[in-house]
Image (cartoon, grey):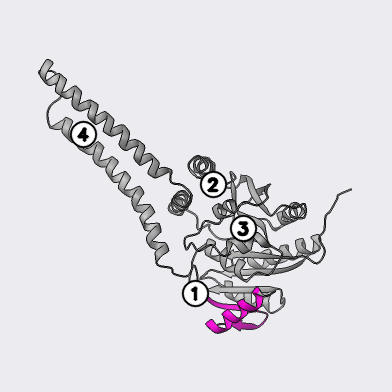
């Protein structure tokens, strides 16, 4: 007989970041309703329309008009999935928050496993992709990235764990107070600590449309993670500098020795000089690029721009559009 743990009178907020997911949203909504009914909790579903150019707005208006537990937040433009999750967490009122992508690659049915771990006392329950529908070389690169990142980072992120997770309210309250503009949620989620555990799941292909992930976006995410949670590149620069300085000093001694003892065999000519210039020039450019990445992050944070801008919040048929209306709504929801 299956054992089920249920916390009565608890509420779960699902925050779904949407971009080009108009076809998937109704299916996501129905599957979420089924799983929340199955585990027996109150719910709210917060869809974040992150500047999607498809029919996402129309789809969300239709769902909101039939279910007052559904909230549609529209951003003024595409700020990225991380900003979408933060936007939704700020609005959420649940005792726990589930973060999901809107393309159905994060199966809503896994929430039941998250929930059971949560009621056991875990503050963060994250999904671990034991298998994913991706090309062989991309799958290998994803696995290599997580392992390389954990070798470099000062905070360990669970291997193959994405944003899909259930996070207790007290952890959410800490996350939404972080001041960083350029946020990497799975890193911040690990940084805050608390009691955490992973749940294995299979990540299917995107059900509709084409994924916005590509080589450029994956390189961007890798850079964002590494330069947000690691000082190792700077340590490498120092180490390389020490090694090359030592080699250069040794080379000078050898050069002088050969010049006086074996003048005919001493290295000479334009080729040797060109190779050395190219080598040391390349090292210098690499070092400058590492330092530049950190400086650019500092520059971005000093601007103190908002992480996102909400154009509209729709609850039922009521639209909150002005800054005053949105701020008043946020204040009301925070007091819950």
For image coordinates 47% across by 70% down, the residue present is 306
Residue 228: x and y, percent? 46, 52
Identify the element where label 4 is drawn: helix
* Residue to which mark 4 is pinned: 275
Q: Quadrant for residue 206, please give it.
A: bottom right
What is the spatial separation of the Cα atoms under label 3 and label 4, in whole angstroms? 52 Å
Left/right of residue 68 with respect to residue 289 in the rendered view: right
* Residue to which mark 2 is pinned: 155
Q: Contact, CB < 8 Å: mark 3 with mark 1?
A: no
Mark 2 or mark 1, earlier in chain: 1
Q: Contact, CB < 8 Å: mark 2 with mark 1?
A: no
Q: Does the magenta stretch include residue 335?
A: no
* Residue to which mark 1 is pinned: 76
Q: What stretch is highlighted in magenta?
A: 309-334
Q: Is disc 2 surrounded by few (<14), some (14 to 19) or many (20+) residues within 10 Å?
A: some
Identify the element where label 1 is drawn: loop
Between disc 4 and disc 2, the foreground one is 2
* Residue to which mark 3 is pinned: 207
Q: Which of 55 and 330 is in front in this view?
A: 330
Residue 221: x and y, percent? 47, 53
């Amino acid at each position: 007989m299956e054992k089920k743990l249920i916390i009565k009178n608890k509420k779960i907020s699902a925050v779904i970041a949407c971009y080009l997911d108009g076809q998937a949203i109704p299916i996501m909504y129905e599957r979420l309703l089924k799983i929340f009914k199955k585990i027996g909790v109150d719910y709210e579903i917060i869809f974040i329309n992150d500047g999607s150019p498809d029919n996402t707005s129309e789809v969300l208006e239709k769902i909101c008009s039939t279910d007052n537990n559904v909230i549609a937040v529209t951003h003024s433009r595409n700020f990225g999935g991380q900003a979408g999750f933060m936007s939704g967490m700020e609005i959420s009122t649940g005792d726990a928050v589930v973060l999901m992508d809107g393309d159905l690659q994060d199966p809503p049915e896994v929430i039941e496993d998250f929930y059971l771990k949560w009621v056991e006392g875990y503050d963060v329950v994250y999904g671990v992709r034991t298998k994913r529908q991706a090309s062989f070389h991309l799958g290998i690169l994803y696995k290599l990235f997580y392992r390389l990142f954990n070798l470099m980072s000062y905070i360990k992120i669970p291997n193959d764990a994405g944003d899909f997770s259930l996070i207790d309210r007290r952890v959410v309250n800490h996350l939404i107070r972080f001041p960083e503009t350029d946020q990497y949620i799975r890193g911040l989620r690990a940084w805050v600590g608390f009691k955490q555990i992973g749940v294995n799941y299979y990540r299917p292909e995107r059900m509709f449309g084409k994924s916005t992930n590509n080589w450029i976006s994956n390189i961007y995410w890798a850079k964002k993670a590494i330069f947000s949670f690691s000082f190792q590149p700077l340590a490498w620069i120092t180490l390389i500098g020490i090694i090359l300085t030592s080699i250069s000093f040794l080379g000078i001694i050898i050069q002088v020795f050969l010049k006086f003892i074996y003048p005919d065999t001493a290295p000479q000519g334009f080729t040797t000089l060109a190779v050395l210039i190219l080598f040391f020039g390349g090292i210098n450019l690499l070092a400058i690029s590492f330092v530049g990445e950190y400086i650019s992050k500092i520059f971005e944070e000093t601007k103190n721009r908002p992480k996102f801008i909400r154009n509209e919040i729709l609850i039922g048929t009521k639209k909150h559009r002005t800054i005053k209306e949105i701020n008043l709504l946020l204040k009301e929801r925070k007091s819950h």
